[in-house]
Image (tube, rainbow, N blue to C red):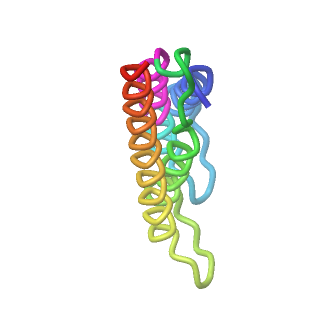
């Protein structure tokens, strides 16, 4: 996941929010579009901010965490499905927390890798 996925999420979200007015049961298309647009903006920002790090030696991808967070937000805020024994808001919250943890862990690992490279480079 990267810049292309962020642009795609942004485009699909804008289409759902502004161009499509469908009445699908249990789905708030405006909320879904807003969530997808926000996820696309975040993914674009993270992709741009970390682009230099990727090209200079690799970067642990935060895309999976962002995807988990976006899916969790959709479940928590945009869908209202009455499935027995499943509380969609709680499931969405769990996915959002898991996605946030994955993003933070990815950024921490990247920082540690960058510091390790600096120490090795300084010793040479």
Asked if residue 37 is positioned above or below residue 67 in the image, the reply reads above
Measured from the top left, where is residue 78 in percent x and y?
A: 49, 53
Residue 1 on the magenta segment = no
In this view of the protein, which residue sits in the foreground, 48 or 29?
A: 48
The structure residue drawn at horizontal position 43% and vertical position 49%, both measured from the top left corner, is 105
Measured from the top left, where is residue 33 in percent x and y?
A: 50, 37
Asked if residue 62 is positioned above or below residue 26 in the image, the reply reads above
Q: Give the range drawn in magenta.
A: 38-52
Measured from the top left, where is residue 29 in percent x and y?
A: 53, 43
- The quadrant in which the C terminus is found is top left
- The quarter of the picture where residue 108 lies is top left
Q: Main secondary structure of the magenta part?
A: helix
Asked if residue 84 is positioned above or below residue 74 in the image, the reply reads below
In this view of the protein, which residue sits in the foreground, 59 or 23?
A: 59
Q: In the displayed structure, does residue 84 sit left or right of residue 113?
A: right
Asked if residue 111 is positioned above or below residue 18 in the image, the reply reads below
Q: In the displayed structure, does residue 22 sit left or right of residue 17?
A: right
- The quadrant in which the N terminus is found is top right
List the single residue furthest toward the front: 124
Measured from the top left, where is residue 28 in percent x and y?
A: 50, 49
């Amino acid at each position: 996941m990267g810049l292309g996925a962020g642009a795609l999420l942004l485009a699909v979200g804008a289409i759902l929010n502004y161009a499509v007015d469908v009445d699908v049961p249990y789905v708030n298309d405006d909320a879904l579009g807003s969530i997808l647009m926000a996820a696309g903006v975040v993914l674009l920002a993270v992709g741009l901010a970390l682009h230099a790090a990727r090209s200079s030696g690799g970067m642990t991808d935060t895309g999976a965490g962002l995807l988990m967070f976006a899916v969790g937000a959709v479940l928590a805020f945009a869908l209202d499905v009455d499935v027995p024994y499943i509380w969609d808001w709680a499931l969405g919250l769990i996915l959002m927390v898991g996605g946030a943890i994955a993003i933070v862990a990815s950024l921490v690992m990247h920082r540690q890798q960058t510091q390790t490279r600096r120490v090795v480079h300084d010793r040479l």
